[in-house]
Image: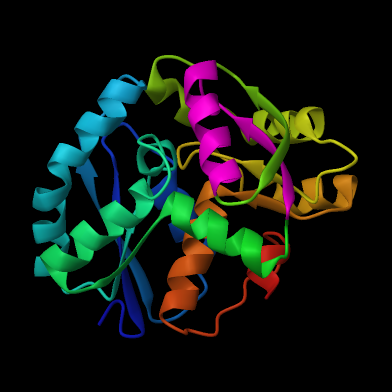
């Protein structure tokens, strides 16, 4: 049976082409873990559309519940912080009430990853607009994480984020890094990062966290699977 150790259910934006691929890439040699996704509609990335995306949450929960998932993740970073502090917890509560399955969101996972790594200051690199970046900074600062620098690529339409080659994330990470930050965070589950995290950590000599890496790590941690994945950053070596 696929997923005899753990079935991970992802709720992702409809235009996201990266999150499933990166999860499957990282789990390809791990027996007994399977990844299953459903989608909620998103086409244009804005505060309004990110909030509207949540309207599809109940249907998505019903679909993944029917496939008997072990853990669920709302796989959209901006979609889980856009309404402000505690919005991620509101989403988790709704998922768990609908499904009775342990859940997380990407922004929740990132905060938990920063805690584990004892990070107090981050440099933030994203494909977002300035408007969405400001929401991200507010979210992190509300969670007692200082943002020493931020840079967004202002990529529109949203589907084009998934078309960016990994070197774009690598260059963004080197560009946004500051001497006083403890960690570089590359945001967005539709942004290709897993190929370059180790390379970027070697260059910057500090941890690098990405949305998909942190979400995958938190799913593993929530189910106490005891899985480590060397080659994809400090976080997944723990």
The structure residue drawn at horizontal position 48% and vertical position 30%, both measured from the top left corner, is 135
Q: Is residue 161 above or below residue 97?
A: above
| 98 with respect to 33 (left or right) | left
The structure residue drawn at horizontal position 24% and vertical position 61%, both measured from the top left corner, is 93
| 147 with respect to 156 (left or right) | right
Q: Position of residue 76 (x, y in %)?
A: 38, 43
228 and 154: which is toward the camera: 154
Q: Position of residue 224 (x, y in %)?
A: 47, 84
The structure residue drawn at horizontal position 47% and vertical position 25%, both measured from the top left corner, is 132
Tell me the quadrant of the picture where the N terminus can be found. bottom left
**Picture quadrant where residue 105 is located:** bottom left
**Picture quadrant where residue 67 is located:** bottom left
Q: Position of residue 197 (x, y in %)?
A: 71, 50
Q: Position of residue 43 (x, y in %)?
A: 28, 23
Residue 27 visible, this angle:
no
Q: Is residue 157 above or below residue 210?
A: above
Tell me the quadrant of the picture where the C terminus can be found. bottom right
| 64 with respect to 177 (left or right) | left
Magenta segment boundaries in residue numbering:
120-142
């Amino acid at each position: 049976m696929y997923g005899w150790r753990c079935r991970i259910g992802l709720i992702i934006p409809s235009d996201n082409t990266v999150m499933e691929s990166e999860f499957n890439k990282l789990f390809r040699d791990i027996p007994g873990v399977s990844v299953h996704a459903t989608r909620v509609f998103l086409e244009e990335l804005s505060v309004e559309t990110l909030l509207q995306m949540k309207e599809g949450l109940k249907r998505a929960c019903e679909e993944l519940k029917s496939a008997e998932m072990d853990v669920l993740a709302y796989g959209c970073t901006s979609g889980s912080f856009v309404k402000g502090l505690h919005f991620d917890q509101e989403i988790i509560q709704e998922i768990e009430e609908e499904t009775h399955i342990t859940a997380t969101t990407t922004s929740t996972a990132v905060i938990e990853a920063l805690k584990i790594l004892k990070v107090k200051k981050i440099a933030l690199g994203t494909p977002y607009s300035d408007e969405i970046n400001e929401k991200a900074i507010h979210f992190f600062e509300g969670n007692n994480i200082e943002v020493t620098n931020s840079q967004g690529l202002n990529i529109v339409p949203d589907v084009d984020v998934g078309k960016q080659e990994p070197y774009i994330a690598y260059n963004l990470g080197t560009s946004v890094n500051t001497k006083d930050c403890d960690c570089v965070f590359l945001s967005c589950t539709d942004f290709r990062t897993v190929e370059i995290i180790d390379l970027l950590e070697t260059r910057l000599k500090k941890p690098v966290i990405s949305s998909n890496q942190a979400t995958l790590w938190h799913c593993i941690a929530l189910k106490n699977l005891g899985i480590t994945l060397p080659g994809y950053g400090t976080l997944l070596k723990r």
